Image (cartoon, grey):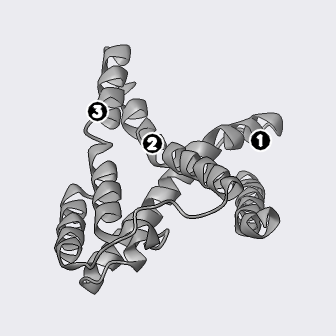
Amino acid sequence: MGFHLIGVLCLIIISQGIKAPERDYSIPGTTTSKIFTTIGVAANLVFAFNTGMLPEIQATVRKSVVGNMLKALYFQFTAGVLPMYAVTFIGYWAYGSSTSTYLLNSVNGPVWVKAATNISAFLQTVIALHIFASPMYEYVDTKFGIKGSALAITNLSFRIVVRGGYLTVNTLVAALLPFLVS
C-alpha cells in the first residue's frame, strides 16, 4: 500500500476517532481464543514483513550484495513498519476493541480509499504468495526435470497444472481453517 494511501487512511481514522463516543479498550475472549488470536497475529506479521524480501532480493543484483541486502532489511524493519503500526494503533485508539478485525469495515470514508486499500492488499497477497511459493515451484521443477523454455507447451502445461493445483489446495485449506478450528 502506498504511503500516501496510508496517510489518507490515517487522517480519516483520526477524524472519526476524535468524534467517536467513549470506547472500550479491553481485550475480549477466553484464554484459549486469546492464544489463537495471538498465533493469528504472529502469522499476519510474518505475512506483512515478507514483502521486505523483494528489495532484499533486488539488492543482490548489485555489488556489494551483503551491504545492499542489509540496507533493504534495515529499511523494511524501520521505515517499512511505521505505516503498518500507525494504522494499527490509530485504528485501535479510534474504534477500541469493538472494531472489526478488518479495520476498513469500521471506517466510514470515501469509497475510493477502501477500494484502493483493498486493491493494494490484494496485490500484496499476490507478491507474498509468489515469494512463499517460489521455493516450492523450484523444487517441483527440479524434481520433475523441467528444463528449457518456460513457454514450451509441455513445460507450460505442467506448470499450470502443478502450480494451479498447489494454489488451489492452499486456497482450499486456508478457506477451511476457520471451520477446522471451531
Count of marks, rendered view:
3
Q: Residue at x 39, y 24 (%)?
A: 60
The answer to whether 157 is drawn above or below residue 83 in the figure is below
Residue 146 visible here: no
Viewed as shown, does residue 39 lie left or right of 73? Answer: right
Q: Which residue is drawn at 63% across and 48% down?
A: 39
Q: What residue type is labelled 1?
A: Val
Secondary structure beneath dot 2 equals helix
Instruction: Identify the residue position indicated by label 3 in the image.
Output: 75
Q: Which of 80 and 155 is in front in this view?
A: 80
Residue 49 is tagged as 2
Q: How far apart are marks 1 and 3 (CA)?
A: 33 Å
* Quarter of the rendering containing residue 10: bottom left
Label 3, residues with CA under 10 Å away: few <14, some 14-19, many ≥20: some
Viewed as shown, does residue 134 lie left or right of 172? Answer: left
Q: What residue type is labelled 3?
A: Phe
Instruction: Identify the residue position indicated by label 1 in the image.
Output: 140
CB atoms at circles 1 and 2 under 8 Å apart? Answer: no
Of marks 2 and 3, which one's residue comes earlier in the chain?
2
Secondary structure beneath dot 1 equals helix
Of circles 1 and 2, the one toward us is 2
Q: Which residue is drawn at 35% across and 62% down?
A: 92
Secondary structure beneath dot 3 equals helix
Q: What residue type is labelled 2?
A: Phe
Residue 141: x percent and y percent?
74, 40
